Image (cartoon, grey):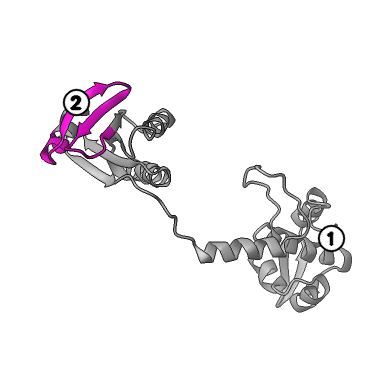
């Protein structure tokens, strides 16, 4: 699909004079004494397209990335991610619908100040404070991370391994895990089994977990 004609039509409708392939830019639009508008075109968003647009910021602040509008949930998700990144870089985003050439401007270029999430910030600080030591290697995948929740589960498992089946309240006090009863009841890792009301024992998976995660939860 040729993206240029519909984008040129929209810009001309806003009073711009538009020309293609001017210098290194795919599309350049001028209106009076205003700074030029530059649009870099690709059939789909890519890292190369971001690089091109960032390079054009040396010429003007009004830089857009243009690509084909992909329908459906997958296209919507991808587009949302691209728009989020573009906003952070001060770039605009426009798409062209394949079926009828409709051009949609999703965001305009401009300074970006991200909104801070106090909830996420508090959760991060809480997890930092609760975690014992620094058991993870920076940059590793989410699978196999040692979280404060896993460390609490290991403390409960260690108590049961040493003392046998125990009441949740007893584990909570001895292991220093106030949520021990709920944690063992939820049994997220399959390490615990309920033997009677409020009483839990360690499973074979729990014993294996203590071996596998050794030294990842005790005080350094």
Residue matched to label 1: 219
Residue 214 falls within the magenta-colored stretch: no
| Mark closest to the chain's N terminus, 1 or 2 | 2
Give coordinates of residue 207: x percent, y percent.
80, 55
**Residue 2 in picture, x, y percent from top left:** 21, 25
User: What residue is drawn where x is 42% and y is 28%?
Assistant: 48
Residue 8 seen by the camera: yes
* Residue placed most toward the observer, 32 or 149: 32
Q: Residue at x 54, y 62 (%)?
A: 120
Q: Position of residue 30 (x, y in %)?
A: 20, 34
Q: Which of labels 1 and 2 is toward the front?
A: 2
**Would residue 137 appear left or right of 166 to someone viewing this image?**
left
Q: Which residues are magenta?
A: 9-38
Residue 8 position by quadrant: top left
Q: Quadrant of the C terminus?
A: bottom right
* Separation (CA) of disc 1 from disc 2: 66 Å
Q: Is residue 187 visible?
A: no
Q: Is residue 28 magenta?
A: yes
Q: How many marks?
A: 2
Query: Looking at the image, is 190 positioned above or below residue 164?
Result: above
Q: In this figure, which residue is indicated by the disc labeled 2?
A: 19
Q: Residues within 10 Å of mark 1 (few under 14, many from 20)?
A: few
The local secondary structure at tag 1 comes to loop
């Amino acid at each position: 699909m040729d993206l240029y004609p519909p984008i040129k039509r929209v810009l001309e409708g806003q009073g711009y004079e538009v020309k293609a392939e001017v210098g290194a830019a795919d599309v350049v639009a001028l209106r009076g004494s205003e700074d030029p508008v530059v649009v870099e075109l690709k059939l789909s968003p890519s890292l190369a397209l971001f690089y091109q647009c960032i390079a054009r910021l040396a010429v003007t602040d009004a830089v857009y990335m243009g690509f084909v509008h992909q329908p459906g949930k997958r296209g919507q998700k991808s587009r949302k991610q691209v728009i989020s990144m573009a906003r952070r870089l001060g770039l605009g985003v426009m798409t062209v619908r394949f079926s009828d050439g409709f051009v949609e401007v999703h965001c305009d270029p401009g300074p970006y100040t991200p909104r801070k999430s106090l909830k996420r910030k508090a959760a991060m600080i809480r997890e930092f404070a609760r975690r014992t030591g620094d058991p993870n290697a920076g940059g590793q995948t989410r699978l196999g991370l040692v979280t404060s929740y896993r460390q609490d589960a290991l403390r409960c498992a260690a108590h049961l391994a040493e003392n046998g089946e125990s009441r949740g309240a007893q584990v909570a006090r001895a292991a220093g895990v106030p949520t021990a009863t709920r944690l063992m009841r939820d049994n997220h890792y399959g390490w615990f089994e309920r033997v009677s009301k409020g009483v839990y024992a360690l499973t074979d998976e729990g014993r294996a977990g203590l071996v596998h995660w050794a030294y990842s939860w005790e005080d350094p």
